[in-house]
Amino acid sequence: MPKQRTFAKSAALSGIALHTGARATLRLCPAEVNTGIVFRRADQPGRPEVKALATNVVDARRGTTIGTKETAVYTIEHIMSALHVSGIDNALIEMDGPEPPIGDGSALPFLETVLEAGSVEQDAEAAVWTAATPLYIAGGDTQLILVPADELKISCVTVYAGSPVETQYLQVAVTPETYRREICSARTFVDYRDLRQLMTMGLVKGGSLDSSAIIHDGAIICKDALRFKDEIVRHKILDLIGDIYLCGRRVKANIIAIKPGHYFNVQLAAAMLKQI
């Protein structure tokens, strides 16, 4: 069995937060065996903490938010994605605000910070989640099917109306190598109609073409060229990898995802947690 791992040293990432528009700093810190992934709000009295588990999710509409009565941490899916693939079992993620920097809208800045911190083996076996029975989550046009496997493999279909390529499909066996090459740099996408609504709500104050691509009138608008012709489906896989880590263990499963999103991803993670 693999051993648990934590960071070899601390490392930090700073930048603009997506919704508040404020400058934010996230610091990755080593943690003891069996700690799991814990977020700490260093900006609040008492420095409250919340563990990254599906049972602590309080909102999953526009991103994944975890919280307790004392605190909340928004938009954790990208950092969770990087931690999951990197095999980090125990970590203290210290933040000076409610949300991490958005970076370029992908998981690449977080993965680079994880690699900067490095990792060390700890004296305890790592917990690996494998399916006792298949799982099925569905609602609206979304279907998530999970079956047992000896690796993490994801097959994903997205349908983004108005995109130049409306239907996208990708199957990938998720390893550190394939994640770095094919998944982690895929950026967030938003439909212009949704963007207008978010702006009316006073959100996405820190959003820009530096951190997302906008789908509008049959075109994709972004600062640079698309990183992949099917960047949308790759980002959906990136998010799913992060959200299922809310089961609290490294995941080995074959997942078929049709039009996934955070709300249903978190439902799947909760069903996974129930099997433990």
Image (spheres, helix red, strand yellow):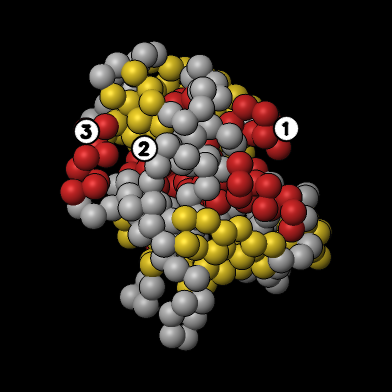
Mark 3 residue crowding within 10 angstroms, few (<14) / some (14–19) / many (20+): few
Closer-to-camera residue (30/191): 191
Q: CA distance from mark 2 to mark 1?
A: 24 Å
Which amino acid lies under the numbered mark 2 shown in the image of this protein? Gly
* N-term mark: 2 or 1: 1
What residue is shown with label 2? 261
Q: Residue at x 68, y 47 (%)?
A: 112
Disc 1 marks which amino acid?
A: Glu
Label 1 neighbour load within 10 Å: few <14, some 14-19, many 20+: few
Q: Position of residue 201 (x, y in %)?
A: 20, 52
| Separation of residues labelled 3 and 1 (CA atoms) | 36 Å
Q: Amino acid at mark 3?
A: Arg
Residue underneath mark 3: 193
Question: Which residue occupies 41% across, 65% down?
Answer: 98
Element on which disc 2 rests:
loop
What residue did someone put label 1 on? 177
